[in-house]
């Protein structure tokens, strides 16, 4: 008996279902990218599914979340399609076009104007969120930084990579909540226990032990350490600067016609470096979102010049032995699957 | 190899001369993969069976004018029940019959002895009555007769099979030949009553973890890659540890690595396990020998070898 092969040309029931998974593209033999349209759609949809199953979300529930980036956008799409009211607490990093897009999707957007003295805007957003919880008795907070359904949602990506690439040797991704890198690698390691996981962070992010501070490169890094970052899973950690990430983003478009955002550039640059040093390894870089949000910034020469970032930055990373060791605008640490306490 | 149900049926016999029909079913050696799988938005228990041509069961059904089936030996009552259910499903083309079961499949050890009884009985009734049923219909009858089934009605194909519903979830394609070094996982081969085990309760993480296993198995079967197949089997074995643990699994995994096995598979609700090897690799005979010695050093005295058929 022969069953029909899995159908690859089928009608999707929503834009979420149609676009939540990445396209797997081979850059050169042994080097692939997983290019998402909007990666955060996947955890947003998955977390809401599980919450509905558990009965935590139902008719009349207001969804509350703090986000200044693409998780809010993914959540707004999923909530709109299912009819849940949504309030997003953000900070000035939400640019006007993103705020408009969220509002067009029916979300209420609250901006925290001032950072907290400790914990920055992240803390200020979380504090405001606590106030909103009290205002809406029937609420649900996805909590992308601590909800274990965030990393779990990436089993679908691991399945896709296993089916298309087989057994990758190395996975590279930007770290913000920890969901994509910790989640995808935990599933892939069932099949590839010695998978090398490389986390890409940026200077003055607290995730891997640097003191928190102002960051130009957004969409990765964090002022707090999210519980969803499983530190003992990472083999290498890279801290990459804005100039390097932006130049790599432009390069990704100019050379490979992949129109992606700056976290994608950062991930691609580190993956490209690892792939060149390990030519026999099969490497996959996660590219989290497309370039449209950044047309007036990363994709504008004028803007880059005004920021003093119109240069390619470091071509190679400098190896450090501690997260706080200075080493220029691109450093890497042989993290060795340590805990944060052991590495600091 | 298990006979193909689709071609087992002979040309219709004349009604006046009832004739015996016979059908043979191989044992299985547990599973390559067992867990829960999402299809059409539903979560279903499923497995991919590893066929084991070392042992088999043959059923012979002779139609009689008596109502209902008599089985020999009489204790193979699930086979009788399967024959009666099949006759019912076919609209009783004959009132009943005499069902003979001969089998060399060890009992209660995860070799699928009772499933083979049931499936061979269904096949024998079909052969005797000149009727046909699809593998999915055979699966449904088999589950009705004994609660759960394996996927051997699909012959040599790797089918993700809903073993408690008797339905295929996904047909991955023809299974590549694999060489297996089998061994028992409980001292003395005490055996396990598979149907007495409660179904595994998986964690939220485990439910998701079966997705990439299924993804890699698709690729393994598509490419005929025994190496990838072994990784899937090992992952499924490791995930099953929380539910029916194999004593000393870490040592077995280390022996498998040292011997160049592609992976370790288990009967997820039985007590047989196997080290998997690429049947097409010229190094495999030497690796099997080395692996048997490594297992012996771990105190595993009883091993057996077989190859899934090409």
Image: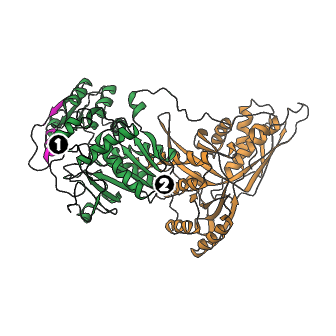
In this view, the mark in front (2 or 1): 2
Point out the stretch of residues depicted in magenta.
Answer: A109-128
Q: Is residue B232 visible?
A: yes
Residue A89, horizontal then vertical, whole percent: 18, 36
Where is B246 relative to A282, above or below?
Answer: below
Q: Colour of chain B?
A: orange
A233 within the magenta span:
no
Of B206 and A325, nearer the camera is A325
Of B201 and A166, nearer the camera is A166
Residue B207, horizontal then vertical, whole percent: 44, 46
- Residue highlighted by disc 1: A126
Residue pictured at 73% horizontal, 41% vertical: B122
Q: Colour of chain A?
A: green
Give the CA separation, mark 2 to mark 1: 37 Å
Instruction: Decide if residue A57 is on the left or right side of residue B45.
Output: left
- Asked if badge 2 and badge 1 are on a common chain, one would say yes
Residue pictured at 43% horizontal, 57% vertical: A195
């Amino acid at each position: 008996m022969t069953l029909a092969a899995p159908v690859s040309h089928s009608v999707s029931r929503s834009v979420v279902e149609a676009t939540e998974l990445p396209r797997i593209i081979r850059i050169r033999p042994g080097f692939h990218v997983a290019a998402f349209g909007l990666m955060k759609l996947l955890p947003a949809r998955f977390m809401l599914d599980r919450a509905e199953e558990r009965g935590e979300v139902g008719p009349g529930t207001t969804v509350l979340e703090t986000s200044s980036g693409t998780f809010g956008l993914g959540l707004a799409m999923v909530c709109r399609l299912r009819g849940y009211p949504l309030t997003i607490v953000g900070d000035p990093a939400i640019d006007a076009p993103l705020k408009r897009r969220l509002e067009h999707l029916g979300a209420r957007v609250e901006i925290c104007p001032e950072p907290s003295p400790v914990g920055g805007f992240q803390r200020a957003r979380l504090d405001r969120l606590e106030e909103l919880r009290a205002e809406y008795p029937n609420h649900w907070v996805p909590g992308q930084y601590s909800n274990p359904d965030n990393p779990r949602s990436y089993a679908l990506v691991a399945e896709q990579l296993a089916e298309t690439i087989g057994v990758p040797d190395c996975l590279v991704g930007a770290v913000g909540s920890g969901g994509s890198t910790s989640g995808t690698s935990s599933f892939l390691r069932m099949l590839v226990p010695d998978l090398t996981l490389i986390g890409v962070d940026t200077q003055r992010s607290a995730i891997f032990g640097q003191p928190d501070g102002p960051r130009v490169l957004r969409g990765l890094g964090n002022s707090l350490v999210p519980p969803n970052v499983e530190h003992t899973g990472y083999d290498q950690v890279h801290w990459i600067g804005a100039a390097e990430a932006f130049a790599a983003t432009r390069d990704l478009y100019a050379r490979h016609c992949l129109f992606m955002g700056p976290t994608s550039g950062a991930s691609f640059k580190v993956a490209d470096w690892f792939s060149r040093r390990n030519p026999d390894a099969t490497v996959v870089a996660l590219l989290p979102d497309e370039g449209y949000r950044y047309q007036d910034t990363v994709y504008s020469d004028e803007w880059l010049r005004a920021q003093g970032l119109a240069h390619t930055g470091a071509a190679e990373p400098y190896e450090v032995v501690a997260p706080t060791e200075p080493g220029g605008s691109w450093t890497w640490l042989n993290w060795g699957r340590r805990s944060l306490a052991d590495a600091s | 190899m298990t006979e193909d149900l689709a071609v087992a049926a002979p040309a219709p016999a004349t009604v006046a001369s009832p004739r015996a029909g016979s059908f043979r079913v191989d044992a299985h050696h547990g599973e390559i993969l067992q867990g829960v799988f999402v299809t059409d938005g539903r979560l279903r228990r499923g497995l991919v069976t590893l066929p084991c041509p070392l042992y088999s069961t043959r059923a012979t059904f002779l139609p009689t004018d008596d109502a209902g089936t008599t089985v020999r030996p009489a204790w193979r009552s699930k086979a009788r029940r399967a024959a009666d259910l099949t006759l019912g499903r076919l609209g009783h083309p004959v009132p009943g019959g005499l069902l003979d079961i001969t089998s060399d499949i060890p009992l209660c050890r995860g070799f699928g002895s009772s499933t083979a009884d049931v499936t061979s009985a269904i096949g024998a009734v079909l052969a005797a009555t000149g009727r046909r049923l699809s593998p999915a219909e055979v699966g449904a009858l088999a589950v009705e007769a004994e609660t759960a089934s394996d996927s051997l009605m699909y012959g040599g194909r790797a089918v993700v099979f809903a073993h408690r519903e008797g339905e295929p979830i996904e047909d991955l394609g023809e299974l590549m030949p694999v060489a297996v070094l089998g061994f028992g996982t409980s001292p003395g081969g005490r055996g396990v009553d598979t149907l007495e085990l409660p179904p595994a309760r998986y964690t939220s993480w485990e439910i998701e973890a079966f997705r990439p296993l299924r993804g890699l198995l698709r690729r393994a079967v598509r490419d005929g890659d025994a190496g990838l197949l072994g990784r899937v089997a090992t992952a499924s074995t490791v995930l099953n540890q929380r539910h029916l643990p194999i004593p000393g699994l870490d040592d077995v995994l280390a022996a498998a690595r040292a011997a160049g096995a592609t992976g370790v598979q288990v009967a997820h609700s039985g007590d047989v396990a196997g080290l998997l090897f690429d049947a097409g690799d010229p190094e495999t005979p030497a690796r099997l020998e080395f692996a048997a010695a490594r297992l012996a050093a771990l105190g595993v005295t009883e091993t057996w070898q077989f190859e899934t058929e090409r």
